[in-house]
Image (tube, rainbow, N blue to C red):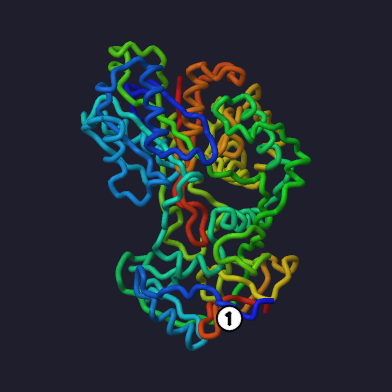
Amino acid sequence: MKSRDIVIAGYAETKIDFKTGRSAYDLAGEALSQLLASTRIDKREIDGLSVTVALSEAGNPFFAVYMTDALGLVPGWLNLGGMGGCSATGGVARAVAAIRQGQCKAALVMSADAPSSDWRASYGAYRAEFQDPVGLQGPPAMFGLLMSRYMHQHELKLEALGKIAVTQREHALLNDNAYAKFKKPLKLEDYLAARMIADPLRLLDSVMFCDGANAVLVTTAENAKRLGIRKTITPVAYAEVTNFNGDEACPDITRTGFSQIGPQIFKQWGRTPQDIRMFHPYDDFTIAVLMQMEDLGFCRRGEGSKFILETDLSYKGTLPLNTGGGQISAGQPGLASGGLNLVEAVRQMFGEAGARQVSDPRNALVTGIGVIPYGRNWSTSSAMILEA
Amino acid sequence: MSEQKPAGRPVPKPNVYVDTAPFWNGVKAGKLVLQYCPETKQFQHYPRPVSIYTGRKNVEWREVSGKGTIYACTVIRIPGPGLEGRLPLCVATVDLDEGVRFIGNVLNCAAEDLKIGARVKLAWDKLNDEHNYPAFELA
């Protein structure tokens, strides 16, 4: 992200809902239609497409091509994002590179998934022999292991994780797109009373699979101007890592990929975590938010609980956190969830966040997380800084 | 009470993605046999197509003691496929004494006794009358 000539020039998001019975294609169509309406561009201006792999369409090796067909797009650049929750920010970074190389002029980064209606993912590989027999079917148990180790090495205050859940719920109450059933106020007592699902992880530490779609438009600042688009924001720093600690037998599982890419993005940006106006981290579990705060440098390792309890994370606060409610309180639209917090950051920076608008939304840090591997911290981490 | 004999749990199919026969032959013989990289003198688990340390196919299989220390642990309390009749289920990430990590169930262990730092030894979980799966119990 050396120059500032390429921008995000539009966004779209469907409502998040449970068991809609709709497909990823149908949800993507709604997002595209919305984006064309808000940017007032002709669809023929879109000559690049990045699609996030959808759990609900995971059996189709030609998903990205089928998506172009469903949407009537004829791109000169096509990317299939297979990094789970990192695919949206990763898609933006790849679109920036493709535009810079002249492969396309305006790329749509589309994430749509409907796993609560149709689950077609099969991970294969080693899992049937070495993971499934032990009972580790899903992310909650893997995050239970991770959280147990964090608690062993560092002080973890449940009130801090509860504050994340409560704050994000307050934000979801102000978000028209949040899953309707989550739109009930949450108190710290509710969080603490939530049932254990994989010790020490509680139900309200977790997300719930839903359906939904989101998209952003990436193009040059010059092209946005030609298209009559006035509101744009700029990706100014990006880094990612996959298979973090993947060549170690017994790595520290409390150390995330953000400990590696955090310093990289702040070096690119030339500023510090204290200069971040709002934080939109990938939030599949509350402990993941805390660990990212530490590894991205908002506070020191082990001081996440203290930092959370001392910081106003509300949309009115000093470091607004996932102002749309995040996945935890707006619902997790499958692998499209990596775009959920990205779109909220863009919405805030366009000044279109309504009742939850952050004052002076001059910049944002957006992250992604993907895949929980065997015996380690999560595999893929991505982080992007956006400037107004 | 049903008069039917319990069907048991699914037996994993070996060699699906890499050659895991030495592991499963070890299981049959009551041994825990894991991949070893002779160049870097380190074990690795789960089994890979290459050494994760060198990227080369130069990997061997060696028996480990099955003794280790609980590195992380959880108690699964929500139902899921393959979990019928097993809840609450104690799961531990165990750092074996040979310097390799193995995730297994801790058998005959009360949830409150499952603790990081506890020493464990190899045990065998019965999938059915004929097949075992490696697990641990408190040492």
- Measured along the vertical axis of the image, is residue A44 above or below residue A212? above
Q: As drawn, is A84 to the left or to the right of A274?
A: left
Camera sees residue A352: yes
Q: Secondary structure at mark 1?
A: strand
Q: Is residue B61 above or below residue A113?
A: below
The quarter in which the C terminus of chain B is drawn is bottom right
Image quadrant in which you'd find residue B19: bottom left
Tell me what residue is drawn at x 58 percent, y 60 percent.
B80
Most distant residue in the bottom direction: B29
User: Image check: A168 left or right of A9?
Assistant: right
| Chain letter for the residue marked with disc 1 in the picture | B
Residue at 45% x, 23% y: name it. Answer: A387
Residue B117 place in picture, x, y as percent: 67, 67
How far across and how far down the image is residue A305, in percent? Answer: 69, 42
Where residue B131 appears, as percent x and y from the top left, is 51, 82
Would residue A209 appear left or right of A71 to someone viewing this image? right
Q: Is A118 above or below relative to A220?
A: below
Looking at the picture, which amino acid does disc 1 mark?
A: Trp
From this view, report whether residue A13 is shown above or below residue A162.
Answer: above
**Residue occupying image coordinates x 59% and y 78%:** B6
Q: Which residue is mark 1?
A: B124
- The residue sitting at 39% across, 33% down in the picture is A28
Residue A260 visible in image: no
How far across and down, in percent of the image, does residue A111 sit? 41, 36
